[in-house]
Image: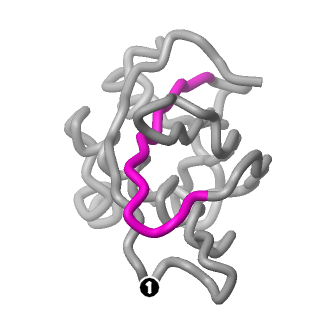
Amino acid sequence: MTETGYIYSVEFTVRDYECDIQGVVNNANYQHYLEHARHEFLNSKGISFTQLHEEGTDLIVTRVEIDYKYPLRSRDKFFVRIYLRREGNVRLVFVQDIFKQPDEKLIVHAEITGVATKNGRPVSPGEIIAKLGLE
């Protein structure tokens, strides 16, 4: 099931080397697409992984759920769209859908849960929450 109210979208094109012998995108590459989209989204909000790390805060993934609906093939164009929600005080869930172009066919639905940590312990990502407009 997809969410409405996407807050970010980024376009990609499948590269030949991302496909397996069957001619479809290898399942692990979808995680790369999703991660790259999350990083681009956070960068667009002024959130830098490098700067956070230098300040002692790390953003880590704690759970990945992916539903594969249909495969992508070499040279396919697609969008990764993001919807974001909070769970409690420390968890952020990135709901991410991949849609093939031009027909907007749903390819992947994923929910990626993450937390902010300081010295290996979960902390409230207050400043990050504020930058994301989730207060």
Question: Regarding mark 1 in the picture, which secondary structure is present there?
Answer: helix
Foreground of the two, 30 or 59 = 30
Foreground of the two, 35 or 29 = 29
Name the residue rendered at 55%, 78% in the picture: 19
Name the residue rendered at 20%, 38% in the picture: 46
38 relative to 13 in the view: left or right: right
Where is residue 10 shown, x and y percent of the image? 33, 40
Residue occupied by mark 1 = 17
Q: Residue 45: tell me if it is visible.
A: yes
Where is residue 112 shown, x and y percent of the image? 66, 46
Foreground of the two, 36 or 79 = 79
Name the residue rendered at 71%, 56% in the picture: 62
Residue 78 among those drawn in magenta: yes
Residue 46 among those drawn in magenta: no
Please provide the residue range marked out in magenta: 72-85
Quadrant location of residue 78?
top left
User: What residue type is disc 1 on?
Assistant: Tyr
Q: Main secondary structure of the magenta part?
A: strand
Quadrant location of residue 123?
top right
Where is residue 77 shown, x and y percent of the image? 38, 50
